[in-house]
C-alpha cells in the first residue's frame, strides 16, 4: 500500500475505540445517548439525569437521581485559593483559557489518584460537574471587577448557573431552555475534544488533567469555538439581504461558513433543529433578535449552494442565538459547551479506564535519513 493509501488525515473513518455511550447516524441525522434519542432526552430529561445516564449507562432510579443532584449541589463551591488564582488571570484573557487552567488546578487539591476505586470515580464526577460552572461564572464576574457570586442551594443546576452570572433568579423558561442546551451538548461520540480526553485518560493520569486537556481542545474555531464565530459572522453580514452574497463570496473564496458542515452529519444536525425551536420559544416570550432573520436566510442559501455536498447547519449555528437571548456574552458560549460536555468526557474517561490501553498510534516518516551533522562554524 502506498503512503497516501495508508495515511488518513484527521484519522477520518478510523475507529479508535469501541464505545456504547452515543450513536450517530450522520446520513439520517440521528443522535442517541446510550440508545435513547436526543429529541426524547431534550423533551423529557434534565441535564443531570442525562449526565448520569451517559456516565453510568442507565437512567438513575428516583433515589439515585436525588442523591446525585444533592451531591452536586453541595460541591458547587470552589476553594478560595482557586478564586484567588483566577483573580490573577488577565481580564482580557479568553474564558476558555481560564477554565482550562482552573480545571487543571483542581487536580492540585484532589491529588489522590485511585482509578480503580468506584468511590474515587464518583467523587471526581461530582466535583467536576459541580465546580466547572462555578469556575466559569466566577471568571466572568471577576474579569468585570466584581466578586464571584456564591452558588445558590435552592436552585437546580441550570438555574444556579444563570443565577451565578447575573445574581438574579432566572426566568423559568430561560432556565429550562438552558438545561436543554446542556443536554444537547453533553456528548457527541469521538470528536476532537473527546479523543483528546481519551488520549490523556489512557495514560492513567488524574481526571482533572483529562478534563483540562479536553477543554483546551474544545476551544478551537473548528470545534466548540465555532458558535462564537457564528455571531461575529451574522454581525458582519448585517442584514438578511446580504446573506446570499456572503454565501457566494465564501464559495468562490473557498472560505468555511461557520456553524455549517460536520465530519459525520451530512444532513441538518438534529441538535440544530431543537436549538432553533428553543430560540423561537425564547423570542416568543422575550422578543425577537434581528440576527435570527439573518441566520434563517443564511441557512436557506447555504442549503441551496452547499446542500449537495452534505453541508448543513450544525449544533453551533443556532446555539449562539439562544445564548444571546439568555443574556450570555459571546465569549462564554464555548465555556457553556464545555460545562455540558464534561458529562460526555467523563463518560469516555470511565469507559476508557474499564478497558485501558495507552494510545500510541504510529506515523509515516517522510523526512530525511542518515544525515551528517555539520558544526555550527561550518553552517
Ligand atoms: N462552509 C463551506 N464549505 C464547507 C464547510 C463550511 N462550513 N464545511 C465543509 N465545507 C466544504 C470544504 O470546503 C470541503 O470542500 P471541497 O471538498 O470542495 O474541498 C468539503 O466541504 C469537506 O470539508 P472538510 O473541511 O474536509 O470537512 P471536515 O469533515 O474535515 O470538517 C468541519 C468538518 C466541522 C471542521 C467543517 O465543516 C468546518 O470547518 N465547519 C465550520 C466550523 C464549524 O462550524 N465547526 C463546528 C463543528 S460542529 C460542533 C463541534 O464539533 O464542535
Image (tube, rainbow, N blue to C red):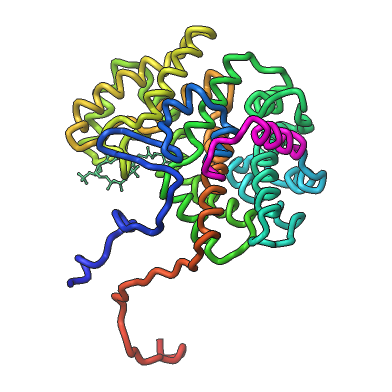
Q: Which residues are magenta?
A: 54-76
Location of the C terminus (image quadrant): bottom left
Q: Is residue 254 above or below residue 211?
A: above
Q: Looking at the image, which is closer to me, 118 or 156?
A: 118
With 82 as the anchor, is 358 left or right in this view?
left
Query: What number of labels is visible?
Result: 0
Location of the N terminus (image quadrant): bottom left
Q: Give yes or no for residue 246 being in the magenta stretch.
A: no
Q: Looking at the image, which is closer to me, 190 or 325?
A: 190
x and y percentages locating residue 186 in the rendered image: 51, 38
x and y percentages locating residue 89 in the rendered image: 70, 46
Residue 247 in which image quadrant? top left
x and y percentages locating residue 218 in the rendered image: 49, 46
Q: Looking at the image, which is closer to me, 112 or 135?
A: 112
Q: Is residue 216 above or below residue 25?
A: below
- Residue appearing at x 30%, y 24% in the figure: 299
- Residue appearing at x 53%, y 40% in the figure: 58
- Residue appearing at x 40%, y 56% in the figure: 18
With 136 as the anchor, is 12 left or right in this view?
left
Q: Is residue 1 above or below residue 355?
A: below
- Residue 112 visible to the viewer: yes
Residue 141 in which image quadrant? top right
Q: Give yes or no for residue 70 being in the magenta stretch.
A: yes
- Residue appearing at x 52%, y 43% in the figure: 57
x and y percentages locating residue 364 in the rendered image: 30, 73
With 189 as the anchor, is 126 left or right in this view?
right
Q: Looking at the image, which is closer to me, 306 or 263?
A: 263
- Residue 165 visible to the viewer: no
Question: What secondary structure do most residues of the magenta stretch adopt?
Answer: helix
With 253 as the anchor, is 23 left or right in this view?
right
Picture quadrant of ligand 1 = top left
Q: Is residue 225 above or below residue 274?
A: below
Amino acid at each position: 500500500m502506498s503512503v497516501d493509501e495508508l495515511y488518513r488525515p484527521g484519522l477520518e473513518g478510523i475507529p479508535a475505540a469501541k464505545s456504547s455511550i452515543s450513536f450517530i447516524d450522520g446520513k439520517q441525522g440521528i443522535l442517541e445517548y446510550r440508545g435513547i434519542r436526543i429529541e426524547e432526552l431534550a423533551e423529557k430529561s434534565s441535564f443531570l439525569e442525562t449526565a448520569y445516564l451517559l456516565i453510568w449507562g442507565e437512567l438513575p432510579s428516583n433515589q439515585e437521581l436525588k442523591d446525585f443532584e444533592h451531591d452536586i449541589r453541595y460541591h458547587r463551591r470552589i476553594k478560595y485559593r482557586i478564586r484567588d488564582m483566577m483573580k490573577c488571570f488577565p481580564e482580557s484573557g479568553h474564558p476558555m483559557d481560564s477554565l482550562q487552567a482552573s480545571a487543571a488546578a483542581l487536580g492540585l487539591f484532589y491529588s489522590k489518584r485511585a482509578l480503580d476505586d468506584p468511590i474515587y470515580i464518583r467523587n471526581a464526577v461530582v466535583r467536576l460537574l459541580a465546580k466547572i460552572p462555578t469556575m466559569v461564572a466566577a471568571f466572568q464576574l471577576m474579569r468585570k471587577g466584581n466578586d464571584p457570586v456564591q452558588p445558590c442551594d435552592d436552585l437546580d443546576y441550570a438555574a444556579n448557573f444563570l443565577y451565578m452570572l447575573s445574581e438574579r433568579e432566572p426566568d423559568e423558561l430561560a432556565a429550562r431552555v438552558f438545561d436543554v442546551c446542556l443536554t444537547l451538548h453533553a456528548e457527541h461520540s469521538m470528536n476532537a475534544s473527546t479523543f483528546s480526553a481519551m488520549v490523556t485518560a489512557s495514560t492513567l493520569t488524574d481526571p482533572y488533567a483529562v478534563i483540562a486537556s479536553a477543554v483546551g481542545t474544545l476551544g478551537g474555531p473548528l470545534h466548540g469555538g465555532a458558535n462564537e464565530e457564528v455571531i461575529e459572522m451574522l454581525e458582519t453580514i448585517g442584514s438578511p439581504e446580504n446573506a446570499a452574497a456572503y454565501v457566494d463570496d465564501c464559495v468562490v473564496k473557498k472560505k468555511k461558513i461557520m456553524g455549517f458542515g460536520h465530519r459525520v452529519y451530512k444532513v441538518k444536525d438534529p441538535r440544530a433543529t431543537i436549538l432553533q425551536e428553543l430560540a423561537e420559544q425564547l423570542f416568543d416570550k422575550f422578543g425577537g433578535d434581528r440576527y435570527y432573520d439573518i441566520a434563517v436566510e443564511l441557512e436557506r442559501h447555504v442549503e441551496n449552494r452547499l446542500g449537495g455536498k452534505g453541508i448543513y447547519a450544525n449544533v453551533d449555528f443556532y446555539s449562539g442565538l439562544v445564548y444571546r437571548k439568555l443574556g450570555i456574552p459571546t465569549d462564554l458560549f464555548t465555556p457553556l459547551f464545555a460545562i455540558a460536555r464534561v458529562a460526555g468526557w467523563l463518560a469516555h474517561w470511565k469507559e476508557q479506564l474499564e478497558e485501558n490501553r495507552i494510545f500510541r498510534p504510529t506515523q509515516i516518516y517522510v523526512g530525511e535519513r542518515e544525515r551528517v551533522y555539520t558544526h555550527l562554524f561550518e553552517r
